[in-house]
Image: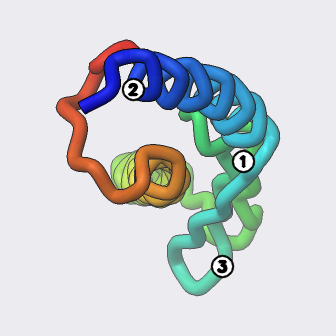
Amino acid sequence: MNIMKMMKQVQQMQSGLAAVQEKLASQTVTSEGAGGKVKVTATCDGNITELFIDPSIIDPSDSEFLQELVLKTINDAIVKGKETAAAEMKKLTGGLDLPPGMGI
């Protein structure tokens, strides 16, 4: 194996990683709960950017239901973002299964 060729590939992967990270920071996913009455939008790098709650489901006597619904919808959005990020990283690494956190 040619070390210089391998180093060049690693450098290309590093620059590709920066581009993917920038793309993921602006790419969004949306998750819905309660038939669309709760919507959460998040960037694929994990930031929640928008939360919508339809006033019709706000019941002051049952705030626990709303809290659980909002948390579930947020977590679903985060999972969608992570899945999208993983798919983008897989494209970058050519399908190599690299350990999480491996700094390329």
Residue identifier under label 3:
36
Name, please, the residue furthest toward the bottom.
35
User: Do labels 1 and 3 touch, CB within 8 Å?
Assistant: no
Residue identifier under label 1:
51
Q: Amino acid at mark 2?
A: Met
Using the image as rendered, state which of residue 82 and residue 70 is in the foreground: 82
Image point (44%, 17%), residue name: 4
Residue 79, image x and y in percent?
A: 40, 53
Residue 67, numbered circle: none
User: Do labels 2 and 1 touch, CB within 8 Å?
Assistant: no
Residue 32, image x and y in percent?
A: 58, 71
Which is nearer the N-term, disc 1 or disc 3? 3
Per the model, the C-alpha gap separating discs 3 and 2 is: 48 Å
Residue identifier under label 2:
6
27 in relation to 36, above or below: above
Image point (61%, 28%), residue name: 12
Name, please, the residue furthest toward the front.
2
Which is nearer the N-term, disc 2 or disc 1? 2
Q: Amino acid at mark 1?
A: Leu
62 in relation to 45, above or below: below
Image point (39%, 26%), residue name: 6
Circle 3 — which element? helix
Side (left or right) of 101 relative to 66: left
Residue 42, image x and y in percent?
A: 66, 45
Side (left or right) of 39 relative to 101: right
